[in-house]
Amino acid sequence: MTSVLLSSVDPVSAEVDALVLGITDELILPAAIPAATRSMLHDMLEALGAKGKRGEITKVPSGGLAIAPLIVTVGLGSDATLDAEQTRRVASAAARALAGTTSALMHLGEPTPESIEAIATGALLGAYRFTHFRGAGSEATPEPINKVVISGNPSDKADAAALHRGQIIAEAVNAARDLVNTPPSALPPEELAHAAIDAVRKLPVTVEVWDEEHLAAEDFGGILAVGQGSANPPRLIRMEYAPKKAKGTLALVGKGVTFDSGGLSLKPPKAMETMKCDMSGAAAVIAAVTAIAQLGLKVNVVGWIPTVENMPGGHAQRPGDVITIYGGRTVEVLNTDAEGRLILADALVRAAEEDPDLIVDAATLTGAAVVALGDRTSGIMANDDDVRVAVWESSQRAGEVMWHLPIPEESRGTLDSHIADIKNIGDGKGGMLSAAAFLREFVPAERRWAHLDIAGPAFNEGSPYGYTPKGGTGAAVRTFIQLAEDLAEGRLG
Ligand code: BES
Ligand code: MN
Ligand code: ZN
């Protein structure tokens, strides 16, 4: 795993394998480099055809211009003062280019706490790889960079805190990516529960795991109904972080479908290929609770993870069945592939019982979200406009792309059932909105709640971009951590 640390050493004197320097589109190097060296490098870069375009990587042998044998320049573009997101992307491009290198010093420009945090996060997210399931003797791809030294003052409190925050957030995102990338046979509900326990082992977080008997005793009918078609029994995981002097309580709920075959309403093969990602909301909750505890944020956080495998076994629920959600409301299940909302309904009712100040769920809930928003934008829906805007603002601060959607009353109307309180599918139009309308039924009206449909961004089937790898992305982790911070600091009302 890649490590990050701070050093205020003069960049050209750093004893590392590579020196990473930011360059502008006029091939201007950072002021911390001696003037003569800057001008020589400028001419070399010009001769190599470097343009300094944002993210552009150029490698130059240092030839004695620095202790490091290799100089890697990364383009900053025309405006050398980058915002956090631009900095994360640039640092990520550099980290990727450093694969196979043991150590590097990154000096993109005069460091600030903001840039240090963004470089740490970007480098760690960019260096991420998932190799756990490569066989012995498989083609060796270069190892990710081992050690990234970031220019900054390790004895300055603000610099050190920024590095720490950047590192913890990136490691949480990478931990969520690992869980999502893990094959579904290796991560049934029981294993997901073990992963939650392992993640917080040395932290002040308590984890309770309710097995199928406990779930039956307490009438969690949604989780049990979806889970009954699988040989791997369902679980409900509750994680609690309750520090002293907490400024409120945040409930985070994550959809934990470890594999979604669709159940008897079976998906076609192509649609099933990525359905190990259907526990991305759960992964985000586990990772965020871990990071929130590591950061010692002054807010109570309760994570709820209903987890099941949605399979078409002999005991599977049938289209036409009526089930009873925790708390007593009944649902006519007409499509067993609309399963996420059934397990989330149980968890939302249970989460609300504890009177949190805010409930936010994240779920790879609908294919309709991917149609509407594409695969890089999550949808935000809520039972209150102020909450929706506040959650969007937190997502912006965190650097995740999300956008607002309504929950129209008409959507709720399409869910009317003749024989039960509600049915689990609407008329097929606006599927992301009717799914949210369904969930809203299970949250008390006075309780502030927001729903994130992360079906698009949770899993990247295309090529890597920015600091986003192929496969699991860790979507919603940073927004969840930011929400906890914003609640602790009174920004969420
Ligand atoms: N897990 C899927 C949604 C999904 C689709 C996530 C694509 C990620 C990528 C969800 O359980 C599902 O199957 N939803 C159905 C709902 C429909 C039956 C009302 C869908 O979107 O087709
Ligand atoms: Mn489904
Ligand atoms: Zn699903």
Image: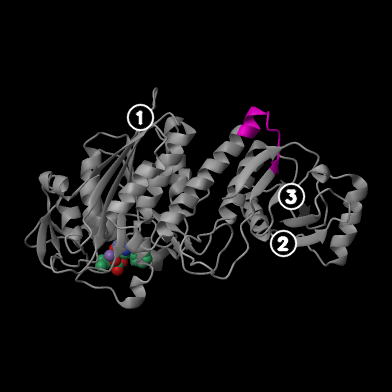
* Residue designated by label 1: 242
Circle 3 or circle 2, nearest the eye = 2
Q: Secondary structure at mark 1?
A: loop
Residue 384 location, quadrant? top left
Task: Magenta stretch: give its range.
Answer: 150-160
Amino acid type shown at disc 3? Ala
Q: Is 395 covered by the magenta stretch?
A: no
Task: Give whichever of discs 3 and 1 has the lower sequence position.
Answer: 3
Q: Residue furthest right?
A: 36
* Residue designated by label 3: 80
How many labels were placed on the picture? 3
Amino acid type shown at disc 2? Glu
- Label 1 beta carbon within 8 A of ligand 3: no
Q: Residue furthest front?
A: 136
* Residue designated by label 2: 56
The image shows residue 190 at horizontal and vertical percentages of: 28, 52
Q: For residue 444, say whether it is visible.
A: no
Q: Is residue 170 left or right of residue 43?
A: left
Residue at 57%, 70% in the rendered image:
139
Q: Secondary structure at mark 3?
A: loop
Residue at 47%, 35% in the rendered image:
294
CA separation, marks 3 and 2?
Answer: 14 Å
The image shows residue 147 at horizontal and vertical percentages of: 65, 47
Categorize mark 3 by other alpha carbons within 10 Å: few (<14), some (14-19), many (20+). some
Task: Give whichever of discs 3 and 2 has the lower sequence position.
Answer: 2
Categorize mark 2 by other alpha carbons within 10 Å: few (<14), some (14-19), many (20+). some
Quarter of the C terminus within the rendering? top left
